[in-house]
Amino acid sequence: MGALTSNSKRDPYSNAPDFHISKKPRLSSFMHQAPNQTLGSSNNTVSRISRYPETTSKFRREVHAPCRILKFGISRSKDIEYSEKNKSSTAEMGNFLSKQLDFAKRSALGAFRYLIKEKEVIDVDNELEKSGKEVVSDDSSIQEVEAIEEDGREDRSMVFDRRSGEGVVDVKIVEERSVVTVDGNIGLQYASKMLDSLTLNNEVVVSSVEAYKKLLGMAERRDGRLKELDFQIELNEKKLSFYQSIRPVKKPEVQEIPDEPFIPLTEEEEYDIKRALSANNRRRILVTHKNSNIDITGEILQCLAPGAWLNDEVINLYFELLKEREKREPEKFLKCHFFNTFFYKKLAGGDKKIYDYKAVRRWTTERKLGYFLIDCDKIFVPVHREIHWCLAIINKRDQKFQYLDSLKGRDLRVLENLAKYYVEEVKDKSKKDIDVSNWEREFLEDLPEQQNGYDCGVFMIKYADFYSRGIGLCFNQDHMPYFRMRTAKEILRLRAD
């Protein structure tokens, strides 16, 4: 019995609550019956083996199912809980290992560099703690960046959400070719260099509260300059509005269309025109102008019928009537001179097209005209270009040489010839030297435009009619049938209205 007591004390599993006796028959039961053997003998191998539980095999198969309770009553879940308790107790025993762990984490995170793909957008809802802690804290959960290892290769995309006890900071990074480090201490180290390079148009990733405060301070220092610029802008706007208010407002010139150029024809006048244009009067002389010695027959007057081209006799007689109208009412019309249709052909040299002042020198003597050309405000020169009529004007009143073409054509040679002629004419008749080199050569574009191939002559004589009145060209293609009838009426009565 004493041997049993001694053996029970040596057995380490005798008092274990989860110990189970093996179901196999133990050799100790047979040895008990031997009278000459003692159970507690250290030399007995069987007795020593019976003191310990069976050994389990070291080779275990994989279990693809919920884990069963291990032998001796210890489960895996309990084993995990036991290991966690040991870890926590180890951390509480000293701060050395935890400090080393934190340092290792920061060093590992600091080894990464981040490539920022697009423009950064920083939304700060609440301030972080006043201490210079990094934005990426240990209690974070969501933040998305793309990591580039130090060798430059793209590694992976990570998501974090950094939350502090006082608020939430969401950092969305979307800018190209910007490189920052996650380590807040490194960001603070280079914050001054980053802020020195900052301008109003640059955008920098804010990696910590300290950097954010420095950026905010620089922005506040710029507020003074911005306010000064705002003040100057506002002051200049007020000055502009003041000057605009005291500036006299020019009313738009609305030209009133006079009634005289558009007086309707009476029934009697229309009847006389139709009778004059009839075939029975083709060879009959309808009127004779004594001062110009021009006879107008029914055939010549046919050029004023719809769709016909104007001839020289009608144009020259109409210009004579315009000059007589001016003499009757000089206060109502400008002082003008009207050359006939042969003048410019003579001046330009005819078929040879060589300028020749001598060919027209005697056309404008004082005895013939009763005045000098230098005394006229405007001088009208009809120009015939093969089958098209144009009008040139020596405009002394505005110091211009003007060219009017109902088809918007241009001929600078006509204006240069007229400039030479005017200088020589004034010198020859008035004994004065004038300089017209600074006079403008103008091709009028804003003109009533011809819409067919036969009204160019009517446009040309009406240009002279309206300009001699001192009014603008307030007519168009639709007025041409009326102007043909009115011109025929004025020629038949030898009086221009």
Image (tube, helix red, strand yellow):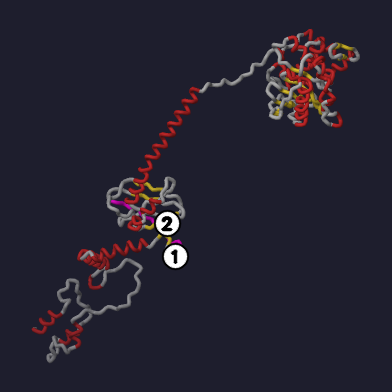
Q: Given the image, on which type of amino acid does mark 1 rest?
A: Asp
In the rendered structure, which disc, 1 or 2, sits on the residue that comes first in sequence?
A: 1
Look at 72% across and 16% down and name the residue there: 335
Kindly indicate the quadrant of the structure image that contains residue 42.
bottom left
Q: Is residue 150 left or right of residue 68?
A: right
Q: Is residue 324 left or right of residue 179?
A: right
Whether the magenta-drawn stretch holds residue 323 is answered as: no
Of 235 and 3, the residue lying toward us? 235
Of 189 and 382, the residue lying toward us? 382
**Mark 1 in CB contact with mark 2 (< 8 angstroms):** no
**Place of residue 307 in the rendered image (x, y in percent of width and height, measured from the top left):** 81, 22
**Place of residue 117 in the rendered image (x, y in percent of width and height, measured from the top left):** 46, 54
Whether the magenta-drawn stretch holds residue 160 is answered as: yes
Secondary structure mainly formed by the magenta segment = loop
**Place of residue 247 in the rendered image (x, y in percent of width and height, measured from the top left):** 51, 23
Range shown magenta: 151-164
**Place of residue 27 in the rendered image (x, y in percent of width and height, measured from the top left):** 19, 85
User: Which residue is label 1 attached to?
Assistant: 151
Q: CA distance from mark 1 to mark 2?
A: 14 Å
Q: Which disc, if any, is residue 179?
A: 2
When the figure is inspected, residue 85 is found, relative to residue 469, above or below; the finding is: below
